[in-house]
Amino acid sequence: MKALNAFSLASRGNEYIHQDLAESEQVLENEREQREHAEMVLGDVLRECKQPTITPALLTALGQTDFSQTLHYD
């Protein structure tokens, strides 16, 4: 959506203003959905950091039982 100043708004008809409003509302809804998804992913990451379950389970499934050989902390 293009930025509009007061003069350009006044010179346009109501139809265009309503169209711009509808576009803005759609952009806002898309941004909300993206934010909610990002918050959900962040929550998953924070939970995994507090109590790792997925990574150890994957390593176990792959046959790696000694995590000290896999995880290297320098």
Image (cartoon, grey):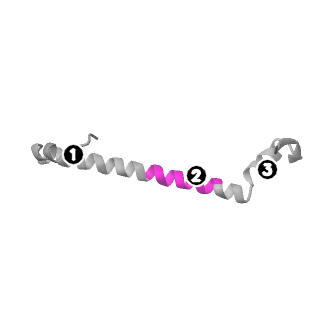
Q: Amino acid type of disc 3?
A: Pro
Q: Are marks 3 and 2 in contact (CB under 8 Å)?
A: no
| SS class, disc 1 | helix
Residue 38 among those drawn in magenta: yes
Which residue corresponds to mark 2? Answer: 41
Which residue corresponds to mark 3? Answer: 56
Q: Quadrant of the C terminus?
A: top right
Q: Amino acid type of disc 1?
A: Gln
- Magenta-drawn segment: 33-45
Depth order, front residue of 8/38: 8
For residue 61, above or below residue 32 = above
Is residue 63 shown to the viewer in this render? no
Classify mark 2: residues with Cα within 10 Å, few (<14), some (14-19) or many (20+). Answer: few
Q: Quadrant of the N terminus?
A: top left
Tell which circle, 1 or 2, labels the residue nearer the N-terminal end: 1
Q: CA distance from mark 1 to mark 2?
A: 33 Å
Depth order, front residue of 9/42: 9
Q: Amino acid type of disc 2?
A: Val
| SS class, disc 3 | helix
